[in-house]
Amino acid sequence: MRRLLRSIALLLTGLAIGLLASCSGSPLAGKPYDPAAPRFPTTAGDNLNERRIEIPAGLDAPYNILMVAFLREQQADVDTWLDTAREIAADHANVEYYELPTVRNGGPLFKMFLDGGMRSGIPAFAARERTITLYLDTQKFRDLAGIDGQDRIWVGLVDREGKVYWSIRGRADEAKRQELKDVVRRIASPDAP
């Protein structure tokens, strides 16, 4: 009986170690930040519909508005951009938008808890499809992206190769919204060069 219990304990320990190893967070790569040629780091994450997405290469459109938040309370700042992002995506078939909550990797149980909580709070399939949580070394991510601190959200227009055409920090206002619309019109319109 003891031998059986010991075998079960070893099996459960092995499964737990395997689970922890398989959920080590989002991969992260990129060249050091160059302000003359900004690039979005290469990473991956699961959206709230549990679809794995390579970022930026696996995003659904050639051009993507990415709204990166680092703290839970920054969701209100992301929300100030959503109507504009929806409008731009509706007007331009080659533009999509995503929310990227970016948090320090806390392991598989933390990921399961956080994703489950967000999933239950976002009932719309389309909104869950556009929300990709990144579990990674947030300092390294910010260093590669050229984001100075996590006190404000980062919003950028990025292509699938990681080129950043435009970026700004913080809440939307009319001037920032118009600036984004102008950049999208210039690069993503059918008559753009």
Image (spheres, helix red, strand yellow):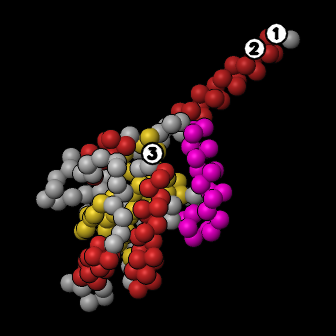
Q: Residues within 10 Å of mark 3 (few under 14, many from 20)?
A: some
The residue type indicated by label 2 comes to Arg
The residue type indicated by label 1 comes to Arg
| Left or right: 29 in relation to 48 | left
Q: Which quarter shows the N terminus?
A: top right
| Left or right: 182 in relation to 55 | left
* Circle 1 SS class: helix
Q: Residue furthest top?
A: 2
The residue that disc 2 covers is 6
| Left or right: 59 in relation to 49 | left
Residue 29 image position (x, y, % from top left): 32, 46
Q: Residue furthest left?
A: 36
Cβ atoms under marks 1 and 2 closer than 8 Å: yes
Front disc: 1 or 3: 3
Q: Main secondary structure of the magenta part?
A: helix
The residue that disc 1 covers is 2
The residue type indicated by label 3 comes to Val
* Circle 2 SS class: helix
Residue 74 image position (x, y, % from top left): 44, 55
Q: Is residue 159 above or below residue 36?
A: below
Q: Residues within 10 Å of mark 2 (few under 14, many from 20)?
A: few
The residue that disc 3 covers is 103
Residue at 63%, 29% in the rendered image: 16
The stretch of residues the image draws in magenta is 108-129
Q: Is residue 175 magenta?
A: no
Residue at 34%, 49% in the rendered image: 151
Front disc: 3 or 2: 3
